[in-house]
Image (cartoon, helix red, strand yellow):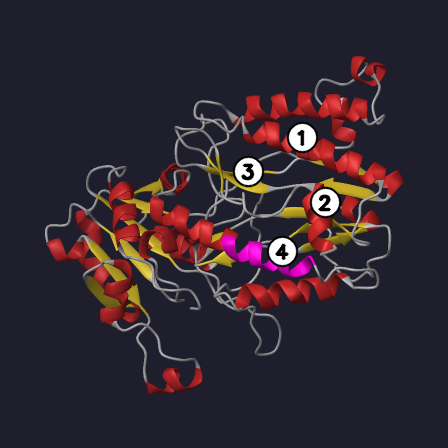
Amino acid sequence: MKYSAIDSKLFIENRKRFIANLKPNSIALFVSNDILPTNADGSMGFVQNSDLFYLTGVDQEETILLIYPDAKNEAHREILFVRETNETIAIWEGAKLTKEQATATSGIKTVMWKEGFDGFLKTVVFQAENIYLNSNEHTRRYIDTETAEMRFNKNLMAKFPLHKIERAAPIMHNLRAIKSKYEIDLIQQACNITEKGFRRLLDFVKPGVAEYEIEAELIHEFVRNRSRGFAYGPIIASGANACVLHYVENNKECKAGDVILLDVAAEYANYASDLTRCLPVSGKFTARQKQVYNAVLKVMKAATNMLTVGNTIPEYHKAVGSLMEKELVDLGLLTMDDIKKQNPDWPAYKKYFMHGTSHFLGIDVHDVGDFNRPLEDGMVFTCEPGIYIPQENLGIRLENDILVTKNGPVDLMKNIPIEADEIEALMNK
C-alpha cells in the first residue's frame, strides 16, 4: 500500500467496541472482497471490505477475521486468516503478509493461513450458539452482483443451518458512525491531499483546457502524496455539464465564460474525503455567476453551523431547505406564489436544489450510519448545498467535510480556498 503504516491500536480498539455489542457465546466472521474481473485475464484491482479493514487494518485479498470472545482457548478469541505466500506468488504478484506482519498490522496475536479456515472452524463453531455474518447494507444501493461476502455467508449458512444467524451490519453502522482520533487524522490527511490537488488547478485552468486534463492534474498530485487516487469517480463538469449531478464523462473542452464544477477528492489509507469547488474558466466570475455562487456559499456556511450535537439530519435538511428557498427567491428563480402552491412532499426549491445537503463520511465516501440518529461528537458529515440552473448553463455546488464535536462543528477543509474573491485572486496571481 502507498500509505504509511497505521497504529494497530486503532483496530484493537475497534474490535473491543464491536465485541461489546455481541450476544453471549457468539462467533463473528468477516471476509475480504473479491478482486473483480474485467475481461480476458484483466481485473479491476482490489479494494478491501470496509468493515474488515475497520476491524483489522489488513488491506489484502483472501483474508478472514474470526472473533469468538467466549472461546475456552484464549488464543481462539481473535484469529486472522491470511493467504499463504510462496516464491511464485512473490515473483508474480509481490509478497503477501507474513503471520508476523499480519499481527503487527492488526494487533491480532493468532494468525493462521486461510487454507486452514474450514478445518479450524469445525473445531469451534459447535461450541457457539450464534454466528454473526456481515453484509453490505446501504439504503442507496442494492447489490445484484454476488460478492465474496455473499458466497461466504451462503456457504456457511448451508453448512451450519441450526445456528442462530445474527446481522453484524447494524453493529458496524453504529460503531463506524463515530470516528476515533486515529480515524479523524486519516480523514484529515485525505483532506490535506485534496487541498494540494485543488491548489494545483488554480493556475492550470484556463479556456481550452479539457476536463480530462484537469482530472490528470489531480490524479498526479493525489498519487504523489501517497493516495491510491480518487475517493470516488471524479466529476469535472464545465458549463451545462454541471447541471448533471453525477456527470463522469469529463471529456469536454472548458470554454471561456463557463464555470467548472469540480466534485473531486482523494482517499488516504482507505478513508475518504469529499470536496466540491467551482472555478471560472476565464479566471473571473460574471456578476450573475458570483451572485449564485455567493448564495450557495451563504447557505453552506449556515448549514455548517447547524451540524451540532443533538440535531438530526431530517430536521437539518428541512432547515437548510428553508434557507435555500429564500436565496432562490432573491435570485429571481422562485416566486412567493411558487412557494405558496408547492407540493409539501417536493418543495419548490427542489427544482434547483434537488439533493440532500449532508451524508456520513468515513472509510466509504457515502459512509454507513443511521440518518435518524441524533448527531454525536465524533461524527463526520459532508456539507454540500447547490443551485443548478440549466437554462443558464450554470451549476454551483460547494462542499466541505465537517467534524461534529461537543464544542461545535470543525471544518476539516477550512484551509481550502472557497471565497469567490480569493479564488479569482489565486487564479490571476
Q: Secondary structure at mark 4?
A: helix
Residue annotated with mark 4: 198
Quarter of the image where the C terminus is located: bottom right
In this rendered view, identify the residue nearer to me: 102 or 158: 102
Q: Which residue is mark 3?
A: 359
The answer to the question of whether label 4 and label 3 lie on touching residues, with beta carbons closer than 8 A, is: no
Q: Is residue 151 above or below residue 423?
A: below
Packing grade of label 4 (10 A; few <14, some 14-19, many >=20) is many
SS at badge 2: loop
Name the residue: 52% across, 42% down: 138
Q: Is residue 145 something that shows in the picture? A: no
N-term-proximal mark, 3 vs 2: 2
Q: Earlier in the sequence, mark 4 or mark 1?
A: 4
**Relative to 325, is 275 above or below?**
below
- Give the residue type that dot 1 points to: Lys
Q: Is residue 277 left or right of residue 415?
A: right
Q: Which residues are magenta?
A: 192-202
The quarter holding residue 324 reads: top right
Q: Which residue is mark 2?
A: 245
How far separated are the C-alphas under marks 4 and 3?
22 Å
Gap between marks 4 and 2 measured at Cα = 20 Å
Q: State left or right for residue 8 relative to residue 155.
A: left
The image shows a total of numbered marks equal to: 4
Mark 2 vs 1, N-terminal side: 2
Instruction: Label the magenta part by its dominant secondary structure.
Output: helix
Three-letter amino acid code at the position of disc 2: Leu
Which callout, 2 or 1, points to the residue nearer the camera?
1
User: How far separated are the C-alphas under marks 2 and 1?
Assistant: 21 Å
Q: In the rendered structure, does residue 159 fall within the stretch colored magenta?
A: no
Q: Position of residue 247 (x, y in %)?
A: 73, 52
